[in-house]
Image (spheres, rainbow, N blue to C red):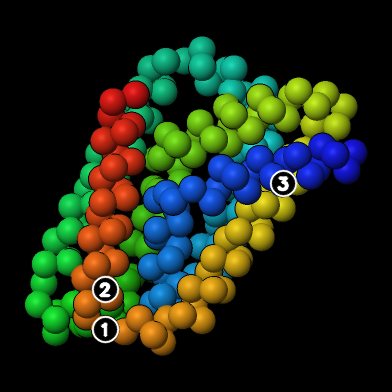
Amino acid sequence: MMTAAVSGFLMGGTLIIAVGAQNSFLIEQSLKRQWAGLFVALFIISDAIAISVGAMGFGLLLQQHPTLVTVTKWSGVIFLLWLAFNKLKASMADDAMIIALSNTKTPFYRALLTALGVTWLNPHFYIDTILLMGNLAGQWQQEKWWFVIGAILASVVWFIGLSGLTSKCARWMERPKFWRWFNRLNAFVLGAIGVQLATL
C-alpha cells in the first residue's frame, strides 16, 4: 500500500516537474497575483481526473480512436504556437508597455480559457496522465488506487509549492528586463512544445 503510494508520488513528481505549458502559465499568474490559487486547484483537479480515468483503463480506449488523438494533437499545436507568438510579441514592446502589460489584470474568462487550454488541449497532458500514469497504475492491480493517490499528492505539492514560491519572489521581478526575458523564455518553451507535438 505505502510502496504503491510512494511510487505514484515519485513518478507523478518526475513528470510534473518538467517545464511545460501549465507551469509557465501558473508562474506568470502567480507573479501577477491573479487567481493563482484558483488555477492551482484547477490543475490539481485536472490531474486527479485524468490519472483516475487512466487507471480505469481509458488510455486503451483513447488509443483505439486515432482520429480523436489527431484532432487533439493539432488543436494543441495551434493553441501553443499562438500563445508562443503572443508572448514573443509582448517581449518586443518598449519598457513602459511591458510594465503596463505586467500590471494589467487579465480578464478572468480569458485566463480561465487559457488555463483550460494549456491543460486539456495539450496532448502532453494526456500522454503523461491518462496513458503513462494510467498504465503504471494498472500494474499495481489491487493497490492501483494508492498509486493514484500518491500521484495526485505529487500534483498538490508541486502546484501549491510552485505558486507559493513564485508569489514570494514577485516583488523582485518588477523590472521591464525581467518581463522581457520571461516572455521570451515562455515563448521558447511553448513554441518548443508545439513543434515537438507537431513532429510526433
Binning the other alpha carbons within 10 Å of mark 3 as few (below 14), some (14 to 19) or many (20 upward) gives: many
Residue 172 image offset from top left, x and y in percent: 39, 85
- Find the residue positioned furthest to the right: 1
Q: Are marks 2 and 1 in contact (CB under 8 Å)?
A: yes
Binning the other alpha carbons within 10 Å of mark 2 as few (below 14), some (14 to 19) or many (20 upward) gives: many
Give how far apart the Cα atoms at labels 2 and 1 are. 7 Å
Q: Split into 4 quadrants, where in the image is the C terminus?
A: top left
Q: Which residue bears the numbered disc 1? A: 175
Residue at horizontal 88%, vertical 43%? 2
Q: Earlier in the sequence, mark 3 or mark 1?
A: 3
Q: Which residue bears the numbered disc 3? A: 9
Residue 179 image offset from top left, x and y in percent: 26, 73
The label number, if any, that marks residue 137 in the structure image: none
Q: Quadrant of residue 120?
A: top left
Height in image: 60 above or below 151? above
Q: Which residue bears the numbered disc 2? A: 179
Height in image: 190 above or below 195? below
Q: Quadrant of residue 4?
A: top right
Residue at horizontal 33%, vertical 41%? 193
Q: Amino acid at mark 1?
A: Arg
Q: Earlier in the sequence, mark 2 or mark 3?
A: 3
